[in-house]
Structures are given as structure tokens and as C-alpha cells.
Amino acid sequence: MIELCGLSKRFDGKREVVALDNVSLKIEKGEMVSLAGPSGSGKSTMLNLIGGLDHPSSGEIFIDGAKLSGLNDDELTRVRRDKIGFIFQFFNLLPTLSSLENVSLPLHLRGWPKAKIDARAKELLGLVRLDHRMEHLPDELSGGERQRVAIARALSVYPPVILADEPTGNLDSATGVEILNLIRDVNERLGATILMVTHDREVAESCPRRITLRDGKIIEDRKR
């Protein structure tokens, strides 16, 4: 489902910084994998490259069999839209839109009819147990509820790959556990492949597979 072949990312400046150094990795369909490591180890860089938000200096990335380097901008946009759901630490919800509207937005971009959009958005908000918060604005929700809306939005097209960047990092510990359980439930019920960046050791070790980065290299790849 996700395959990296000799992936490297360098940032040029007064001094070259190697964020990722010849990383090769394969993540199978339906796996739930944590990506851990100290600050500056390359975790977010790897996630951005896999998500097509940045380009590698060398190496190849395959998502569901598609080689990202072989795609033009329109094709890459379609891969991100149809195959990848993003969950961010700071939610990234539009403040003037309700929960229902935030979840509906990616579906409007696909040109779906309104009735179909409303039905899917309500279904997803039910999945994350926010049926009673559909018309609330983000400021009217708790941090955990906002992350639930963000998860529902990431699932709007039922993407085969979900990339989560510190999804519990901006939450208290109890709410973080709740969100982690929800992500695990999504993995089990929908069969989505999940790659989750985290600096929290307990969160990392709760995943069936844990990958650890240091200085742009994989130093551990362990399954339990």
C-alpha cells in the first residue's frame, strides 16, 4: 500500500541538512503503524513526502501502486484527494463552517450532489459519535470533538491510506486515549492503512507496528 525505495530529502542552505537518508520501507494494506523518534529525526518530512505535499531529493514513493514521481500536478492532486486522508495535530477546521460543513467540504470538491454529500457527512459524524454536534462551529466544540470532526473529514472519501501527524499531541491524556481508540476502530472497521507520527512513547507502542527514526534513518522496525 505504501512503499518507499531509497527515499532521501535534503534541504540546502548555508549548511545542507539531510532530513531523510536513503530510507526504504513497505507498509501493507490495513496495517496500523506508528512513526516515532526525537524532534528533527525526519518523521514529519517522511509524512509530507508520502502525502505528496513535498518532493524527495531522490528515491521513489508508491501509494497503492502509483509512483508519485511519475505523476503531474493534476494527477498528484487526485491521489491526495482520492487515496489519502490527513489528520493534523491542530485540526485545521474552517472556523466559520459547522461540523457537517467541514466534513462535507472535500465531497463538494469532488462535485457530488448535495443529497449524497449530506448523507455521507452525517454517516461519518455518526461513526465518530458526533451526531449531536453536526451544526456546531469549531469554537463550540471541545478539543477532542474537533479532532473527531477532523477524523470524519479525513474519512470523507473512505481513503485507503490515512496519514496522522501527532493526532493526540494537542489533547489531554484522557482525550488522547479516546482519539487513539477511535483511530484504531477506523483501522479495524474500514481496513484503512494508517501511518501515525507521534512523539508519545505509549501511543507509539500501542500500534501493532512501530518504526523509529533517528537522524533521517530507520533505527527500529518492530511488530508485536
Image (tube, grey):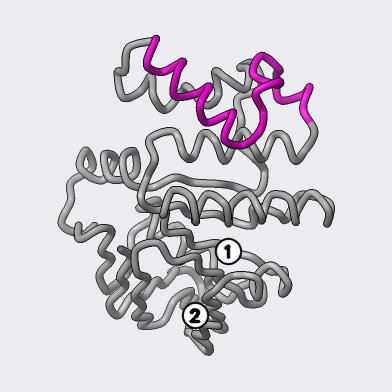
SS state under label 2: loop
Main structural element of the magenta stretch: helix, strand or loop?
Answer: helix
At x 31%, y 40%, the residue is: 82
Q: Which residue is mark 2?
A: 216
Q: Which residue is nearer to you in this view: 114 or 199? A: 114
Name which quarter of the figure residue 22 lies in: bottom left
Coordinates of residue 74 in the picture (x, y in percent): 21, 38
Assess whether residue 14 is covered by the magenta stretch: no
Coordinates of residue 215 in the picture (x, y in percent): 55, 83
The answer to whether 29 is drawn above or below residue 100 in the figure is below
Q: Which residue is mark 1?
A: 197
At x 66%, y 77%, the residue is: 38
Assess whether residue 136 is covered by the magenta stretch: yes
Q: Sort mark 2 into few (<14), some (14-19) or many (20+) by Cα contacts within 10 Å.
A: many
Q: Nearer the viewer, mark 2 or mark 1?
A: 1
Q: Which residue is nearer to you in this view: 160 or 95? A: 160
